Every structure is written in C-alpha cells, then in structure tokens.
Amino acid sequence: MIVAERKPIDQIAEVIAPYQKVLVLGCGTCVTVCLSGGEKEAQELASALRLKTKKDKQEIQVEAFTIERQCEYEYVEQVKDRLDQYEVIVSMACGVGVQTITEKYPSLMVMPGLNTKFMGYPLEQGVWSERCLGCGDCVLHLTRGICPITRCAKSILNGPCGGSAEGKCELSPELDCAWHLIHERLSQMGRLADMNVIQPPKDWSTSHHGGPRTIVREDVRLDSGE
Amino acid sequence: MIAGSNLEKVINSGNFVVTGELGPPKGADITTLKHHAEEMRHYVDAYNITDNQTAIVRTSSIACGATLVQMGLEPIIQITVRDRNRICIQGDVLGAQALGIKNILCLSGDHQKFGNEPGSKGVYDIDSMQLIKGLKDMRDEGTFIGGDELEDSVSYYLGAVENPFADPFEYRVDRLEKKINSGVSFIQTQCIFDLERFKKWMELVRERGLHKKAAIMGGVTPIKSLGAARYMKNNVSGITIPDSVIDRIKGAEKKKEEGLKIAVETIQELQEIEGVAGAHVMAIAWEEKVPEIVERSGLYPRPSV
C-alpha cells in the first residue's frame, strides 16, 4: 500500500490561514489502512484545526468528510457539488489524490494534508516499512524476494558494501542490511553462487529517471478504435 | 604491464609496496596537501587522494591528483559512485587520464548521511562492482558502459577496497574475488586493528589463490590519541577496533608513541603474512609521521623501478 504521514498541524494551519471555508477530505483507501488519512484522521484534523484557529482568534470554518478514493475521477465526480462549497480542500490522500482532484477540477484549491512516504506494509501495528521503489524493472527473482533497490541505502546490485556490520546497515543500527538478508536467504536456498554473478548496471530509464511514466494498455482502453 | 604506473611497477617487482593517503581540504588552497605530499616523497610509492571522503565536500580528487602529477609524484585517485552517475564518472576518468593520472581506486563511498550535505540526493547509478567492470571495459574493450566506443584508447591501473572486518565475514572473500573478476589489479583493505581476523581472511584469500590475481595491500592507520581511537571505533563506518587495542593506548604513558608503535608492528606483521603485497598507510591528520612509520617498519628506502 501507499504509506503516508500527516503533515505537522502548524504547517497545515499556515496553509489554510488565508481562507474562511475549509474542507478536510479523507480518503478511504491506502491512507485509511495506514491510519493517516481516513475518516477518523480527517475528523481529528478538522477538530484540531478548529481548536487551533479559535485559539489564534481566526474566523475559519473547518469541516470534514471522506470519499472512497481520491485517485479516480469517478469517486471525485460524485462529490463535486460538495467540494464546490469550500475555498480550500486539505486532502488527506496521498499525492496522487491531490493531483487527481486538481486535474479534474482546476478551479478547486487542493492542498496536501499528508506527506506521502513510500510503498510498503505494516511490520506490526504502528510500524510501516518501505518495500518497493517502483523502479519499473523488478529484480526480486535475482534476490529471492528481498529488494536491494529499495532496502539497500545505496541500491547496490552487487552487495553488501563495506559498511555492513553484524547484519546492520552503516546508516543505522536499527536498519537491516538488505544484502546481509539476501546472503542469508540465498544461503538457505542453496543458491549462494548467485552472489558471485556480476550484475550489470541497471537500466534506470524504466524508473522515474526516464521521466514521468505513463502506461498505455490498448487491450483495455475504451476508445481503442477497432 | 597495464598502465606503467610506478605503483604497478613496484607491485610487479615483488617489493613490498607502500602507499600513503592525502585528504583534500574544504577549501581551494591546497598548499598543505602539497606540503604533506612533499613530506612523504621517497617514502611512499603512490598517494591515494580521497574523493569527498565521509561525504564531506572537498576539493576534487582529480584536481589534487593532477597537482601531484605536476610535482612529479604519483596519485591514486579515488572514485566513489555516491556523487556521480555513469556519464560523469566516465567523463571524469577520461579527464583524469588526460591530466596524466594512471591509478584509479573504485569505491561505493560513505553514504551522504554522514557528511556535511546530509540532504543531498545520493546518486548510486552504478555500484562499485559495476564501476570496476565499466572502467575495465573502457580500457580493455574500448567501450563505454552503454556500449558506445571510445575515440582512442585509455590505460590506467585499477584498484578497489575490501573490508575484511565487515559482515557477513564468509562473504568478504567472495566479494574480493568478485572485484578481482570485475577487473582490479590491486586491493587496499580497510584499516587493520584486528590482525587475527585479517589473518583469517588472508588464509581464505590464499586458499583461492586470489593473492596471485591481485596485489593485496593491508590498510594501516596510526592512532594519534585515545579519543581518536574511540571516535573511529564508534563513528567511522566499516572500522572495528578491538578493546585490547583501546586498552593498550589507554594504558600507555606516551599515547602517541604507542599509536605509532602499533602501526609499525602491524606493518611488520603484514610483511610476514604470505600473500600480502604491501601496506596502505592512512595517517589521517598525522601525515608528517608517515616517513617515520615507513622507516621504522624497515621499508625505507623505497625501490626505484
């Protein structure tokens, strides 16, 4: 899932300060699951903003509601009339949600309420960890399910580097060395010889380095023109 | 002979090699660096020039290397993959070659988090292994990483680092072999304070005959003070210092002399280990002691080849 974190309240308050009618718009998908931008968090942020603006003696009306998904036009379209009633919308979706609404309705002012962090999963309640960078050319078959692009701070394909100590990364004793994990996994699977293959430089053009990406699937397009 | 550098010639002569290290300053005045280089003249066979070491912005290794060439000294320029993509690295290597630089050391580089620009974007377009292979192919195949051809030939002597003190220990020899297979002719190790572990690693190196495929040079750093030892132990990525070494410095009356003594003893021991081709002396902020260390280790005068 996409994992996000709420922006500091002071930053959000500063952004909405010039407006009188504010909507905090929650999103019912990834950010609901990672407890950062769902119904509950949207209501909480709205209350917190109301308290803060009242304390600061500002006349601001803050309301909140949530839609199923902010990253698809059909869900946004359903609430267009409601969105029109506010001067500014603080989106509690990931960055995709903010941009989907902006592109669909350029007249609306949509600001981000969250910092979108990464694609990952919860290791336990309250702990999320990054697992995919979306490089566009998956190498998990080479490393048997552990991503060196994401989990190695240097995205090394021929690791581990000299900074790996006792299974941890040079960056922090809390961070596992991805290549230590890969070494262990390959060892368990009897495939240690794989470590000796010199992996060639990665073609980063499939990632963001090739420019913003678009996928076109003619087989599923509605207007593919028979 | 690959590049005909002094380093390569001394290695090929079978003499125990000695290299020094110079760290460029955080400013453009390189008078001190030149002074240290002059102090070590005749005591080392070549000088490593670090590349924004520990991710701290410094005068470029190639610029300092070119200055050494003008002084009639021999640089080994370090190239990390942290700050430059493959376009820039290959271009810089051509530039280094044009300036008369004949030795290149390939490294990953300490993560940018450790330096004075922790908010910078790490490049890591290629890794150190791919860097070695890429530079070897430029030299031996006449092709860039992307496959395009060089307009004329290049020749340099390629080295890499290895850290026998990093983990997993059993993989460290595999990794050395991988670097040799990628194309390096010499290896400098991380600073050795745990000689027993180093000897164990060398045993594995000899078992595979890797010491015959590349010259293995042991890294040695003289400890200047108890504080410096503790700092390295706790803060420098990839360095291990056993408590016995810390205790020895702690217990010594003359701490600086003890630090020098440990370095000299280490170099003397290295000369006894089969398969060790030389010592790489990294006297960080203590460059003026290199001649004394080399002399006391019985390695002066240096061979002229």
Image: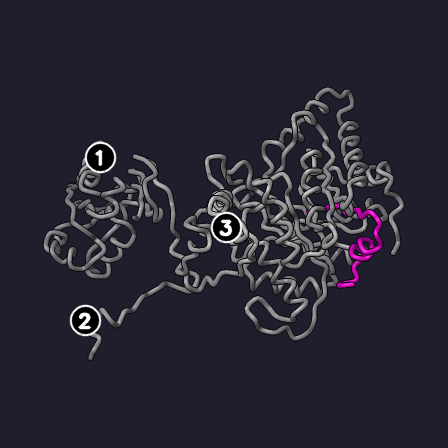
Residue at 67% over, 35% down: B197
> At label 1, which amino acid type do we have?
Ala
Q: Is residue B275 left or right of residue A174?
A: right
Residue B8, located in which quarter of the rendered image? bottom right
Q: Earlier in the sequence, mark 2 or mark 3?
A: 3
User: Which residue does the numbered mark 1 point to in the structure image?
Assistant: A48
Picture mark count: 3
Q: Secondary structure at mark 2?
A: loop
Q: How is the protein colored in the picture?
A: one colour
Give the residues drawn in magenta, as a range.
B1-23
| Residue A102 appears anywhere in the view | yes
Q: Position of residue A226 (x, y in %)?
A: 20, 80
> At label 3, which amino acid type do we have?
Arg
Mark 3 surroundings within 10 Å by alpha-carbon count, few (fewer than 14), some (14 through 19), many (20 or more): some
Is B36 rendered above or below residue A166? below
Q: Secondary structure at mark 1?
A: helix
Distance of label 1 from label 2 (alpha carbons)? 44 Å
Same subunit: marks 1 and 2: yes
- Give the label, 1 or 3, closer to the camera: 3
A84, B155: nearer the viewer: B155
User: Which residue does the numbered mark 2 point to in the structure image?
Assistant: A222
Residue at 59% over, 31% down: B234
Residue A31, located in which quarter of the rendered image? top left
User: Which residue does the numbered mark 3 point to in the structure image?
Assistant: A191
Is A187 rendered above or below residue B134? above
Distance of label 1 from label 3 (alpha carbons)? 54 Å
Do the CB atoms of the residues marked 1 and 3 lie less than 8 Å apart? no
